Image (cartoon, rainbow, N blue to C red):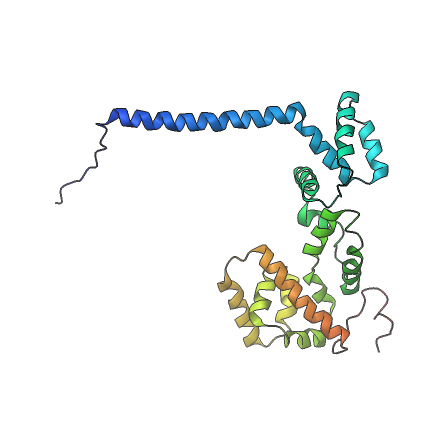
Amino acid sequence: MAKERTVKIDDTNDGESKELIKKVRARFDAANQKTFKIIEDFIAGGYEENLARLLVYLPKERRSAALQKLPESVREKVSSILNTFSEKKNSDPDVMSAVGTVLKNADFYGEKAAREIIQNDDFYFLSAIKGENKNLFEVNPLLSMNVEYYLVNMNILVDIDDRSIQKWLREVETQDLAKALKGTDAEVQEKIFINMSHRAAAMLREDMEFMGPVRKSDVIETQKKLMEILKRLNESGEIVISKRFGGCVGDELV
């Protein structure tokens, strides 16, 4: 039977250990005091600069109304700071950072905000959103950027005819398809599987399974790539994507 080994901590240099603990506590205390100082400064006046940045983000007609809601003493200080911000735009990084913090805390940011605009729309409505969104950046930069980032909806594949889906499938890479489908529901996946041979569908399922977790940003970028291929085929006339309401754009399907 092997002899049991024990590890003994050498605490003979007790003075050195106490000195190390003293340094740790000194550093912690310094950082602790800095934390409290930041909070105190923010309470004492720093928040007023943030309020001014938030006001920059608002359109002028709403800015004045928002100012009037502040207590008079605060309103005067914020107005004074706002005057020094006369050259700032709503797209300036510090302005968007202040607004972004507020929107995140209100849980109206990123995909959630974008989905207010990108709903279960058809191919052509999504294209209209993309075109018009470029004109809306000055109105609300953060919302416009969120829409641009999340502007993809693989659900539109469900409404496309099988022949067009099969044509599109011949143009996409299997690995890209597997990654893109990771972010879709069962209905979309089934639409793809039924338009493939049994062997190809089985291989695709295996690729999706063995791929493991994928970053959402990678899935979104891949989905956009595949939707661009769909758009190209539609524009070249190789496939015809009908509108959900009113048939095909500028024509009638026969």
- What's the residue at 54%, 71% (across, down)? 202
Q: In the picture shown, does residue 13 fall above or below 96?
A: above
- What's the residue at 64%, 74% (across, down)? 169
Q: Quadrant of residue 205?
A: bottom right
**Which quarter of the rendering shows the N terminus?**
top left
* Side of 173 relative to 32 (left or right): right
Q: Is residue 183 visible?
A: no
**Which quarter of the rendering shows the C terminus?**
bottom right
Q: Quadrant of residue 208?
A: bottom right
Residue in the foreground of this view, choosing between 181 and 78: 78
- What's the residue at 46%, 25% (across, down)? 29
* Side of 211 relative to 78 (left or right): left
* Side of 250 relative to 217 (left or right): right
Residue 41 image offset from top left, x and y in percent: 62, 25
Residue 45 image offset from top left, x and y in percent: 67, 25
Q: In the picture shown, does residue 88 fall above or below 165?
A: above
Q: Is residue 111 visible?
A: yes
- What's the residue at 75%, 36% (across, down)? 85
Residue in the foreground of this view, choosing between 214 and 100: 100
Residue 252 image offset from top left, x and y in percent: 86, 74
* Side of 70 relative to 21 (left or right): right
Q: Quadrant of residue 49?
A: top right
Q: How many marks?
A: 0
Residue 150 image offset from top left, x and y in percent: 68, 55
Residue in the foreground of this view, choosing between 28 and 7: 28
Q: In the picture shown, does residue 37 fall above or below 130?
A: above
